[in-house]
Image (cartoon, rainbow, N blue to C red):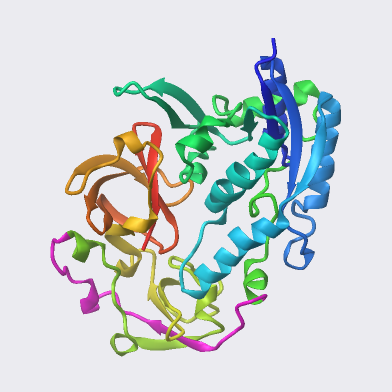
Amino acid sequence: MNKGRVVVGLSGGVDSSVAAHLLIEEGYEVIGMFMKNWHDTSVTISDECPWVDDSQDALQVAEHLGIPFQTIDLSEKYKERIVDYMFDEYERGRTPNPDVLCNREIKFDVFLDAAMQLGADFVATGHYCQKETITNEQGKTVHRLIAGADPNKDQSYFLCQLNQEQLSKALFPIGHLQKPQVREIAKEMGLATAEKKDSQGLCFIGKVRLPDFLQQQLKPKTGNVVEIPANASVYQPHGEALAEMAAPYEYSPEIGSIAGEHKGAHYFTVGQRKGLGIGGTVEPLFVIDVDTKSNTIYVGQGEEHPGLYRPALFIPKSDAHWIRTDLALTIGESKDLDIRIRYRQPLQKGTIHLAEEGIYITFAELQRGITPGQFAAWYLNNELIGSGVIA
């Protein structure tokens, strides 16, 4: 029985390989497609998942499974929508998440369109997440994005910007499995990718030397590293209003002391320890703020420095997104949910407050490394229902 045509994004890794195999077993007509997203090898580490090797592995898997295979060059769109966005965000002293954007803008947009032109009913990926389609209380069909069954591999966070239309066309064949089970299936099938290491790099590009990557457009620029003492007045409570709780701490060189120099504030991110090249302190220095306008990096000593911890965050109205629009809050409404502010972070207890200007999230416990430009995602039980870009 043919359940429909599916284009699988074959990355050359074990997860997408097994995803394709499972779909064939389920009765789908499967086409494998490799996304070529980047040409510039000068900033990738050649022995860490270069796209040429990956595309060959993907082809080998497709031949083994007996499915059609093609490569699609999306490098122009990838540069326009992901790379240029990354440069712009780092230049502003923010830390983007290209994998979240890659899913929203490339895999489930440009790639999805290409799949539809091949007459596909669905696209599938090797993400560790699950989809469930239900009829809600209003009688409407709703697609739920559920966390992956393997808590160590759950990748629902990376899909936090998808919408109902994109989810309606998406299949996640391995989301109900544990990673060891996926490798076992690959071994049983004799797939060439069974023992291949997981890629740690950018979406469908490979491992990137981020400083080299950024220096392509963001030139070195010497500035001061200012150390802020843990007892600075900036950490005293400034009120219980949501806007005050969510506001980032405000630093100035006057409340600290110069600890050294850096080669460009735009190369650093909140919470970073490595790369400062400054020694002689009792405890290691951590970046607590990045000011690209004055080209200043603010640092604090030790894991427990108060500059690393905040009670709340803010997401502007324009950057808020609901996967479950039927569960979206109304202005003035609040709801207790589970929150994640970075991939692999354990879910945190928090409250979402919808205001005219955007969303405030307050946490039950202080959060380490709330970083502008990153995505906060909120879950109802194990379902991801919305997300937004941290201001």
Any part of residue 195 in sight: no
Identify which residue, 266 or 356, lies in the foreground: 356
In the rendered view, does 333 fall on the left or right side of 250?
A: left
**Image quadrant for the N terminus?**
top right
Residues in magenta, as a range: 216-241
Q: Quadrant of residue 316?
A: bottom left
Q: Position of residue 101 (x, y in %)?
A: 54, 52
Quarter holding residue 219? bottom right
Q: Which of 78 and 264 lies nearest the eye of the viewer? A: 78
The answer to whether residue 381 of the structure is visible from this angle is yes
Q: Give the vertical position of 318 relative to 10 (above or below).
A: below
* Residue 235 part of the magenta segment: yes
**Which residue is drawn at the image coordinates 54% and 37% (left, top)?**
153
Residue 386 is situated, as x and y percent measured from the top left of the image, at: 38, 43
Q: Which residue is drawn at 63% across and 32% down?
A: 124
Q: Which of 291 and 32 is in front in this view?
A: 32
Whether 100 is among the magenta residues is no
| Main SS category, magenta section | loop
Q: For this view, does 52 lie left or right of residue 151?
A: right
Up-down relation of residue 234 to residue 355 (above or below): below
Of all residues shown, which one is farthest toward the top?
Answer: 1
Residue 98 position within the rendered picture, expressed as x and y whole percent measured from the top left: 56, 56
User: Is 299 above or below relative to 109?
Assistant: below
Asked which quadrant contains residue 84, the reply is: bottom right
Relative to 298, 10 lies left or right = right
The residue that appears at 80% across and 44% down in the rendered structure is 55
Residue 365 picture location, percent across and down: 26, 51
**Which quarter of the figure is the C terminus placed in?**
bottom left
In the shown orientation, is residue 157 left or right of residue 353? right
